Amino acid sequence: MYDKIVLVTLKTRLEELIERFNTREQAKFYIEHMGLNFADYEREHDVFVKAVHRLRRDLEGLTQKMQAIDRSFLPNFVFTLRDLVVAVGRDGLVANTAKYLDGQPIVGVNPDPVRYDGILVRFPVARAKLGVVRVLEERAAYDAVTMGEVVLNDSQRLLAFNDFYIGMRTHVSSRYSLTWHGKTERQSSSGIIVSTGAGSTGWFSSMQHMAYAVSRLLLKDKAPQLPIMRMDWHDPRLAFVVREPFLSKSSGVRLAAGMVEPGEELKLESHMPDGGIIYSDGVDTDVLAFNSGTVATIRAAERQARLVAA
């Protein structure tokens, strides 16, 4: 079924520093001048490079071809249905990669268990070959992950593994109309977060902690312990939260949070002449413009991500 392994990697912090300062020596001077430990950057880089080198050696010959790409090329890379994807890096790399796939299996590899949690990158380097072989021999178990989908009224489309951000690129107020459950409200806020089940432990969780902190500020010792909402990865619902909604004569706060159930949609109409954007999974370089005249429809995607179980 699969004739090519696509190995997705990402730049280390050291590589990004060298890109910024042109040389390793200049990067070192900057870090140490700021009172930080440059050796930590070097250790992290060395561990990652060794992990990728071993992976390439272990996976060589399992399929007809193997191709390595950096995360930055994902928006323009054309995956085929005969590609088996191996993502090696932080957990977020799996999320960044999944939204560009169409059901191809993902083997998430943790190159540095001391640094990374390994929630999505489940395979240590030493066991990655086993995960790939299971896929090739059709013996692998998978976890299905519901993704979010946004479609604009000009037919542009974007998927999210964890969450969408909709609002202004800068910190000035985002202005739009939100329609949910047959009701429409004009709002002014610092943007909207729409989360999948996989993303419910991320940005959406942070929003809940903020709500609890505000309740303690207002109610002091009488503040109840708010429950934290967690959703399964395969949960077909999406959750949305309006960040810092502002109540005024022209903007409301009644539709500030809710669940988009299966078959339902969340609609947003932009009232921002310029600077409005939509991006997913923290990647603000692959964006959709969300300016005046744009209507975004958000729902659970029919397409699901398939993560190979360890």
Image (cartoon, rainbow, N blue to C red):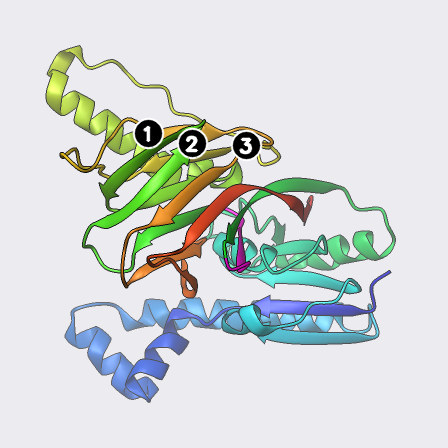
Q: Is there a contact, CB below 8 Å, between mark 1 and mark 3?
A: no
Q: Secondary structure at mark 1?
A: loop
Residue span colored magenta: 154-162
Residue for point 49% across, 45% down: 297
Rendering coords of residue 272 (x, y %): 27, 56
Q: What mark, if any, has residue 255 been given in the picture? A: 1
Q: Residue sitting at 35 percent across and 82 percent down?
A: 18
Residue 8 in the image, given as x and y percentages of width and height: 60, 67
Please name the residue that numbered disc 3 is placed on.
264
Quarter of image, res 245? top left
Query: Contact, CB < 8 Å: mark 2 with mark 1?
Result: yes
**Residue 139 image offset from top left, x and y in percent:** 84, 46
Residue at x 31% of width, y 81% of height: 20
Q: Is residue 70 visible?
A: no
As helix, strand or loop, the secondary structure at mark 3 comes to loop
**Residue placed under numbered mark 2 in the picture:** 180
**Residue type at the position of mark 1:** Leu
